[in-house]
Image (cartoon, rainbow, N blue to C red):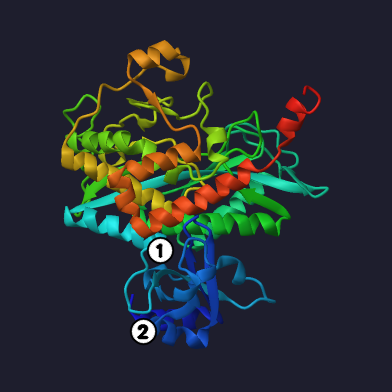
Amino acid sequence: MTKRDILNRVKKDNAKFIQLQFTDLNGILKGVTIPVSKLDDAIEDGIWFDGSSVEGFTRIFESDMYLKLDLNTYAIIPWTKNNSSQAIVGRFMCDVYMPDGSPFEGDPRYILTKQIERVKKLGYIFNVGPELEFFLFKKENGKLEPLPHDNAGYFDQTTDLAVEIRQEMTTALRDFGIDVETLHHEVAVGQHEIDFRYADALTIADQATTFKFTLKWIAAHHNLHATFMPKPIAGINGSGMHVHQSIFNTKGKNLFFDPKDEYHLSKLAKYFIQGQLTHIKAMNAILNPTINSYKRLVVGYEAPVYIAWGQRNRSALIRIPRYTPGREKAVRAELRCPDPTANPYLAFAVMIAAGLDGIQKKNLPSKPVEENIYEFSVEETSKRNIDILPRDITESLKYVEKDEVIRGALGEFAFHKFYQLKMKEWESYCLQVTPWEIDQYLEKY
């Protein structure tokens, strides 16, 4: 869209303010609001801000940065449209730039864009379709508790408040231009999922960021809290972000599909899968970036921790969904280990980098595992050379440090900033004395 297109559309929408949004390295949405009268100048010259206070950005003596608007991401924030007491607000997703006009190396959107450019040079389009699970909680005596009246399980049709909230969330997402396909209750009490249609990686990263922003606002409007924390309650299912992946050419053909293959997978798809299996331990720091992430990824439970692939096998790290004749475009590889605390820009960037490395090296994966790995003994997994994911964030970070492909995808600046952020988080965690420790040791010793 051109500047004139945007200005005309904003005038037609009667927007009074504009939010300029971006994320920090942790994937937390940031933004600055401007009056609509300043939009023309913002499109031309960007909006300057102090980057020294943003997590993972620059140091205090090099803090000047500016936001460059992506005009294709314009939308009206839905809940400002029908509120007579509030001005209508538009929004743009933005890229972060340095004073000399160069892209900021620590901008997650830029990191993904660099990998997308590699894909484009090969004549490919990398498509993704993430499934973000989340919990709805209420506050009871200052504590967060699961949504009241929700004792439902997977796909249960209930009449509680969550049904209406999911529908309201879906309406808001559609107003943002996000093509919602399904909404349903998940396995755990208070757990839900809303799925949206796949598209190219940058579009979906923007949409995933908008998704979290929208769900949190709608929940708060109902005096609830939507959390994407992977394991908020011990003993029940955690929240994941399974990501369906495929590579298309510019004419819309799915290059992962091969009608002659037993699994309907092309060699390109298998190379891509092997690339991700090779680098998954390093990728895991980006795909599961919090200490809490590893409370979900525990061996012995039904968690995607086993480094293997299989068709329709939900115990494998990468699953190939069942092929339906006539639906060649739906052939894909589902990466099952990521969780929704992952910054989608960084997550998709390392997924591309690992997959492209596999395509470049042309190594085929070992045979798929079709049995339930959850039921394997330690001896059986060892016999089949089935490895497991790192057990905590520090172990994952050690793999990133040594992995030239994943570290290279992040860039040295972002890698070091990310490493520092995560180690600071780990050190803070290690200083805590938890209720479990009190119960376990206080009287015993």
Judge from the rendering whether residue 404 lies leftward or rightward of residue 312; answer left or right.
Answer: left
Q: Position of residue 59 (x, y in %)?
A: 47, 69
At mark 2, the secondary structure is helix
Count of numbered badges drawn on the protein: 2
Q: Amino acid at mark 2?
A: Arg
Residue 263 seen in the current view = yes
**Is residue 63 depicted above or below 202 in this figure?**
below
Q: Position of residue 398 (x, y in %)?
A: 41, 40
At mark 1, the secondary structure is loop
Judge from the rendering whether residue 354 lies leftward or rightward of residue 106; answer left or right.
Answer: left
The quarter holding residue 373 reads top left
- Crowd band around label 1 with a 10 angstrom C-alpha radius: few (<14), some (14–19), many (20+): many
Q: Nearer the viewer, residue 362 or 90?
A: 362
Q: Residue at x 20, y 30 (%)?
A: 364
**Is residue 127 depicted above or below 78 in this figure?**
above
Q: Residue at x 51, y 49 (%)?
A: 422
Where does label 2 land, which residue?
4
Q: Position of residue 123 (x, y in %)?
A: 17, 54
Q: Residue at x 60, y 49 (%)?
A: 166
Q: Position of residue 128 (x, y in %)?
A: 36, 47
Residue 343 seen in the current view = no
Where does label 1 land, which residue?
107
- C-alpha gap between disc 2 and disc 1: 27 Å
Q: Quadrant of the C terminus?
A: top right
- Crowd band around label 2 with a 10 angstrom C-alpha radius: few (<14), some (14–19), many (20+): few
Q: Residue at x 42, y 18 (%)?
A: 372
Is disc 2 in contact with disc 1, using a CB cutoff of under 8 Å? no
The quarter holding residue 369 reads top left
Q: Nearer the viewer, residue 144 or 265?
A: 144
Q: Amino acid at mark 1?
A: Asp
